[in-house]
Amino acid sequence: MNGAAARLIKTGEEVIIMGFELTDKLITPKNILVDKNNKFVKYL
């Protein structure tokens, strides 16, 4: 976490990370679940 957001969160807190892209193509979003060690668990 960088910038202003880094000052607002503390170690151990959960955050939601979102990515955006501008394109003319259709994009299917992917949502995943990770564990406390940030390891992939499953697609939602």
Image (cartoon, rainbow, N blue to C red):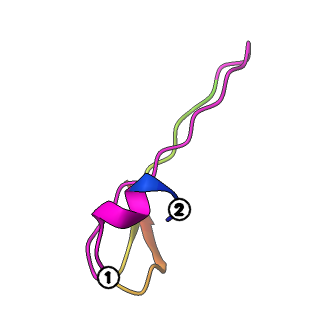
At x 72%, y 19%, the residue is 23
For the point 36% across and 65% down, which residue is it?
A: 7
**With 26 as the anchor, is 9 left or right in this view?**
left
Foreground pick, 7 / 12: 7
Residue underneath mark 1: 11
Amino acid at circle 1: Thr
| Callout 2 crowding tier (Cα within 10 Å): few <14, some 14–19, many ≥20 | few
Label 2 sits on residue: 2
Provide the secondary structure element on which disc 1 rests: loop
Give the CA separation, mark 2 to mark 1: 13 Å
**Nearer-the-camera pick, 25 or 42:** 25
Q: Name the side, left or right, on which 3 lies relative to 10.
A: right
Question: Which percent across, then down, holds residue 32?
Answer: 44, 58
Circle count: 2
Magenta span: 5-26
In the figure, 2 relative to 40: above or below? Answer: above
Identify the mark nearer the N-term, 2 or 1.
Answer: 2
